[in-house]
Image (cartoon, helix red, strand yellow):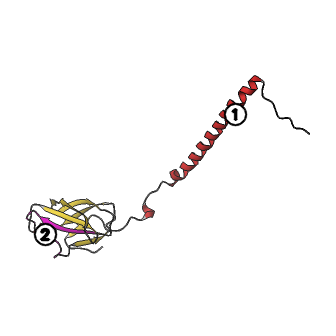
Amino acid sequence: MELVKNIFFNTDKLVENTKIKISYTGKLFEENNNNVYLHYGYGLQWDNVSEVEMVRTELGYQAEIELMSSDSLNLCFRNSNNEWDNNNGQNYSFPIEKVEVALVPQDITSELDAPRRLKKSYIWSKKIRLAIYKIMHYFPKLMSGNYKRKVSND
């Protein structure tokens, strides 16, 4: 990631769908402004633009944001007098990395076990239905004596 002199992150990489802390020690911090706001958006078109008030600390102004799924994070800063620090009109832009699929935990056993349980329950319901049918159909004939076995003619 390209380093910027006055902007710091609490992580080495910006990864989508993670929470990050941004520290700012630029022009607005040096001028001792009371309220500084982080203005940010995603991608070339500045999608999902948001703004959050930053907290003043000894290390600079700080704010936490949740990164969305995008290719880049764009930042600029403003104070309550509507004075901007936007990198001389170019804004601050940082690449966002995608989550590696191998690192995402997946519970494969439960996905494979569900069809097996479904199949077993289906087979048992079929067996029970067949047993009930046989009992209802043949039991009365047995009791009344009207049940005749087929005799084979040899």
Tell me the CA gap for discs 2 and 1: 84 Å
Residue 84's disc number: 2
Q: Residues within 10 Å of mark 2 (few under 14, many from 20)?
A: some
Quadrant of the image containing the C terminus:
top right
Taking 96 as reference, is 28 left or right?
Answer: left
Q: Amino acid at mark 2?
A: Trp
Q: Nearer the viewer, residue 5 or 28?
A: 28
Q: Amino acid at mark 1?
A: Lys
The x and y percentages for residue 86 are: 17, 72
Residue, x 16% and y 67% (percent of image)? 77
Residue wearing tag 1? 134
Taking 81 as reference, is 142 left or right?
Answer: right
**74 drawn magenta:** yes
The x and y percentages for residue 54 are: 17, 60
Q: Is residue 60 visible?
A: no
The x and y percentages for residue 123 are: 63, 43
Residue, x 22% and y 65% (percent of image)? 40
**Image: magenta residue range:** 73-88
**43 drawn magenta:** no
